[in-house]
């Protein structure tokens, strides 16, 4: 009995000391240290992720306020540019939403002009401004009613742009009427009504769900009767990929032509500056549906790149007419190609 107790005591001491024991498990012998069940369940610590030396982090999308000029000057400082540097410059422009085709063409022209002591940012500014050059004034007809049809997707700032434009025209002495042909959105009439009160404009609106073409027709008649100089027509802005919306916009434009006896003086596409490359698709679809005559670039508040308008101008030939730079009623300005290019590259 004493011998048995002695053997048990030895085994207990061995287990506590963590030495090797022999365990029978499912008919096979497993040799190893004794480990607590809690320690078995504990996950092994992860090794820290190491980056190869000299490998930079992924490139960030740089907003306008940080400027492309700093990156460009650093890229081309003091040496003859290499093929890789020219390709990097093109990539910088693409990341600023200028578009692959426009970026390639701009870099090619800059490359042809560039000399070692030239200011590359200045050359780039000149070339971007050249792409954006053209007729940027609103095509309004003095002495008669001018109809301006405004289109764009929801959230682009369309109704706010109409209010700001109304204020700008009224401040210049024009008598303005507004038409709510966005009869699908519940808040559209209310928002446009607020802007009409603020700017002294006359509002033509019907009940929610009314035929947008009927509103447009009545608005032309009412604006003519009141002697208005400008009629601005708001339209629905559901997703641009929905064909019925494009059909509806085409119908509104045809009604305006019939009621007024001529095509609208302007068909303005409101484009959010933060949209990115989706903006070119929006511009293409709206242009095909209603022959867009100009772009209003909104939300250009210093954090947005806005380079998408370069792609729109390059690929579709549609000029920018106005830019929205903030939330204030006066934050809608005529478009200046050189000033815009300088801000993009600054």
Image: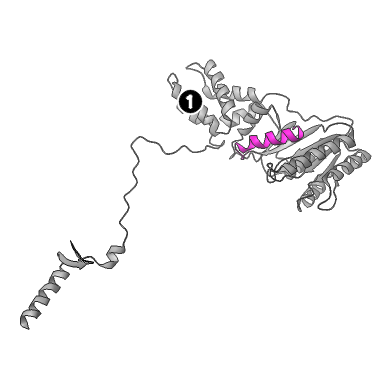
Q: Viewer-proximal residue, 211 or 157?
A: 211
Residue 293 visible to the viewer = yes
Q: Is residue 192 above or below residue 126?
A: below
- Location of the C terminus by quadrant is top right
Residue lying at the far bottom in this picture: please name it.
Answer: 1
Name the spot of residue 174 as percent of width and height, x first.
Answer: 85, 36
Residue drawn 33% across the image and 48% down it: 48
Name the spot of residue 215 as percent of width and height, x first.
Answer: 85, 45
Residue lying at the far front in this picture: please name it.
Answer: 27
Is 107 displayed left or right of 234 in the figure? Answer: left
Q: Is residue 290 magenta?
A: yes
Q: Is residue 255 above or below residue 2?
A: above
Residue drawn 83% across the image and 43% down it: 178
Name the spot of residue 238 as percent of width and height, x first.
Answer: 71, 46
Which quadrant holds residue 237? top right
Residue 122 visible to the viewer = no
Residue bearing mark 1: 87
- The magenta span reads 273-291
């Amino acid at each position: 009995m004493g011998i048995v107790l002695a053997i048990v005591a030895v085994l207990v001491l061995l287990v506590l000391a963590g030495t090797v024991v022999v365990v029978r498990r499912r008919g096979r012998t497993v040799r190893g240290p004794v480990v607590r069940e809690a320690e078995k369940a504990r996950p092994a610590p992860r090794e820290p992720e190491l980056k190869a030396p000299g490998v930079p982090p992924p490139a960030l999308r740089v907003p306008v306020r940080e400027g492309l000029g700093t990156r460009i000057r650093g890229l081309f400082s003091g040496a003859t540019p290499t093929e890789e540097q020219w390709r990097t410059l093109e990539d910088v422009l693409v990341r600023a939403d200028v578009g692959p085709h426009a970026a390639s063409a701009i870099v090619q022209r800059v490359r042809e002009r560039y000399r070692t002591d030239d200011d590359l940012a200045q050359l780039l500014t000149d070339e971007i401004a050249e792409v954006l050059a053209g007729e940027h004034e609103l095509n309004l007809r003095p002495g008669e009613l001018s109809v301006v049809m405004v289109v764009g997707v929801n959230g682009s700032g369309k109704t706010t742009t109409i209010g700001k434009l109304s204020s700008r025209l009224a401040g210049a002495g024009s008598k303005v009427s507004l038409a709510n042909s966005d009869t699908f959105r519940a808040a559209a009439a209310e928002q446009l009504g607020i802007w009409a009160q603020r700017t002294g404009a006359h509002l033509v609106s019907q009940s929610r769900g009314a035929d947008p073409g009927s509103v447009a027709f009545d608005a032309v008649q009412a604006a003519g009767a009141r002697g208005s100089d400008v009629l601005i027509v708001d339209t629905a802005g559901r997703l641009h990929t929905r064909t019925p919306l494009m059909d509806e916009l085409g119908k509104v434009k045809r009604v305006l032509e019939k009621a007024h006896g001529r095509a609208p003086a302007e068909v303005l596409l409101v484009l959010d500056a933060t949209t990115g490359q989706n903006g070119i698709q929006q511009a293409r679809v709206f242009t095909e549906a209603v022959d867009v005559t100009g772009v209003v670039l909104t939300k250009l508040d210093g954090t947005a790149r806005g380079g998408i308008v370069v792609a729109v101008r390059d690929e579709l030939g549609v000029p920018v007419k106005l830019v929205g730079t903030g939330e204030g009623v006066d934050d809608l300005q005529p478009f200046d190609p050189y000033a815009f290019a300088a801000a993009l590259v600054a």
